[in-house]
Image: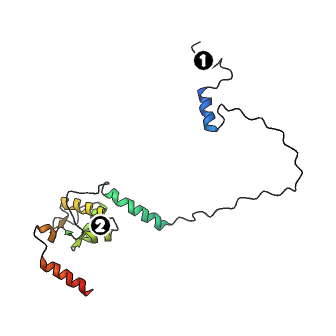
Amino acid sequence: MNGWDTDDQGDENSFADVVNGFTFGRGGRRSRKREPEQERPEQDTVAPRLPRQQPGPGPRDEQADSEVASSIRPYAWTGGRTRSQVQLELETLVSTSDNYRPGVRLSLEHQSVVELCHESRSVAEVASLLSVPLGVARVLLADMAELGLITVHQTVSDSGSEPHLMLMERVLSGLRRL
């Protein structure tokens, strides 16, 4: 006898019995003895009431599902990246590059950006028109700039000089007209 034989154990449970007992709720516990029921006066038997059905969520709203999916999917476009090598500001203008050839096969998101950027657009406009978060648009545009698919136009803040006084005056006068 090596201590592992289970034939001579009698009342002891095997490991599987113990695990199944925990899983199914009857482990090594002994069942309670039931006391004989006291006699109850007979009552009119009434059909048991069914539980009231709680209002459920109802039919699924496919528009809500697509909105959730659209807020998740763009981050998959960037491989989960939130930053890129090219620094793009909100007001940075981008346009389709002369290097882009219409017959070239592109990913769906790059093709969408190329179609939008036939005329110069800001990073914020691209994000809005694609209905993606700004961070996703920045990463996509930076990737496309590195591939030569779009041209990033220099902004006033990128030129290295102090902001132009004339530009600031024009902005101020435009704000006053509002």
Secondary element at tag 2: helix
According to the picture, the residue beneath numbered tag 1 turns out to be 5
Indicate the quadrant where residue 45 lies. bottom right
Q: Residues within 10 Å of mark 2 (few under 14, many from 20)?
A: some
Q: Residue at x 47, y 66 (%)?
A: 64
* Quarter occupied by residue 23: top right
Q: Are marks 1 and 2 in contact (CB under 8 Å)?
A: no
Disc assigned to residue 33: none
> How many marks can you see?
2
Above or below, comparing residue 166 to residue 20 in the picture: below
Q: Which x, y percent locates residue 28?
A: 65, 31
Residue 37, percent from left and from top: 84, 42
Per the image, label 1 sits on a secondary structure element best described as loop
Amino acid marked by disc 2: Ser
Q: Where residue 20 sits in the image (x, y, percent)?
A: 61, 34
User: Which residue is more in the foreground, 80 or 159?
Assistant: 159
In which image quadrant can residue 87 be found?
bottom left
> Does residue 45 sit above or below 4 in this rendering?
below
The local crowd at label 1, few if under 14, some if 14 to 19, many if 20 or more residues have their Cα within 10 Å, is few
The quadrant of the image that shows the C terminus is bottom left
Position of 32 with respect to 36 (left or right) is left
Q: CA distance from mark 1 to mark 2?
A: 70 Å
* Residue drawn at the location 23% of the way across and 64% of the way down: 103
Task: Name the kind of residue labelled 1 in the image.
Answer: Asp
Residue at 32% x, 58% y: name it: 77
Above or below residue 162? Residue 135 is above
Farthest residue in the left direction?
161
1 vs 2, front mark: 1
Position of 45 with respect to 116 (left or right) is: right
Residue at (63% x, 38% y) in the render: 24
- Residue highlighted by disc 2: 112
Q: Earlier in the sequence, mark 1 or mark 2?
A: 1
